[in-house]
Amino acid sequence: MFLVKRLLEEDGDYDERAVAFGVAVQAFSGGIAQLLIMRGADASQCAPDELLSLSQAVDSGSPALVEALLNNSIRDRYAKSELLEMRDLARSWHEAGVEAELRRRTGSQDDLVRTEVQDDEYYMVGELTLGGMTVRDGHGAIVTDLEELLGIRASCEELMARALDHDQDHTAWGRAAILLSHRRDEETWTAAATLRVHTDPSRRLFGAELMRLMELFADSHEDEFAVLAVDTLTDWSAEETDIAVLTTVLHGLASYAGPRAEAALLAHVGHLDAGVRQAVANGLGTRLGSTYLSDEAREALLALMTDADTEVRIAACRQAGETRNGDPALTNAMAALLHHPERRVQLVAVYGLALHDDERCVEASRRLGPPRPGFRDEEMGYLDVAWRYERRRDGI
């Protein structure tokens, strides 16, 4: 995937990207096909016989591949009746279980080979090989995607069951959580609240993720379910003992500014787990254009910018930068990170200083030079802020 990103940065020929899209689909590389679409490939330039059939994509078990074939530019190639058949095909794989269906189709009783693979930019799936046939276990996620496309409303219980068949890195988990969080109804909220007290940490984790997303996707902080989510997550943070669940609970407070949420975050600023401290750093700061930062949050960010963990330092520096209040203690702490051995830390320090209109970002951005091949989008997001500050400073 990294190599493809690097090549796409160098190649501006969109006709070739469309050809590459067809090649990626034929090679069952759904993640690469999606990336090509995001970078300008026009799937409609590929004739139907130059792509896999939708049934082949569904059989493959790759949600990314199915999603690529259902891109807006070619979606009208498939009649509703065909989409319903594909939903049923994916459901049959999901209900039978991939291993059982593989054994039925191949007739093999050999040992199954299973690995975890990246299916798209964000999520993993299991990949199973038996009797010369390889299939991914994303059929539950494919069912969810096709139901959403067809306007079929699966029950909250069914969507949760599809997610909880897997861990949180699996695409079925992510797709179900996002879909449910957008429903914003009593059924979903009750399910999430019930999971809070479940004895199984994986169930609590899904409940925390639902609440986090319900707050994140709210139209405003006054939204009924956003308020409920923040209140619940604030209380939850004081009693959760599982680190993964606690981390998600704290991330759920990251987009909300309020004294209770801030106090809940500050209570974990010295936690032994770096992931928890990173969640704290992500949540401290200002919101809604305000430059106000409480003394407690300021001291916490200063401490976290010296954390032993690189990801914690990056999160704290980013939040300190986005306060945009010119606080000398914050800008000096960010300036100290300009000499950190890792380029990622230097980049976020340049970004933070530029947001504070601190001219130390100019020379530092020059030292860093242009974005590295393969990291152009990410690094441009930081460097461009410094370049824009320099132009403002120089009246250009």
Image (tube, rainbow, N blue to C red):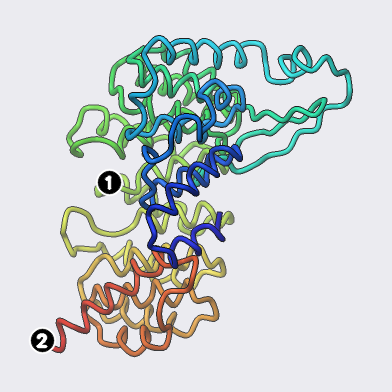
Q: Residues within 10 Å of mark 1 (few under 14, many from 20)?
A: many
Pointer 2 residue? 395
Residue shown at 55% from the left, 44% from the top:
23
Sequence order check: which comes first, mark 1 or mark 2? 1
The Cα–Cα distance between marks 1 and 2, rounded to whole angstroms, is 36 Å
Pointer 1 residue? 256
Label 2 SS: loop
Label 1 SS: loop
* Quarter containing the N terminus: bottom right
* Looking at the image, residue 54 lies above or below residue 7: above
Q: Can residue 231 be seen in this snapshot?
A: no
Residue 249 placement, left or right of 231: right
- The quarter of the displayed image where residue 115 is located: top right
Locate residue 78, reporting x and y percent.
Answer: 39, 20
**Near-viewer residue (198 or 57):** 57
**Near-viewer residue (260 or 67):** 67
Residue shown at 45% from the left, 30% from the top:
48
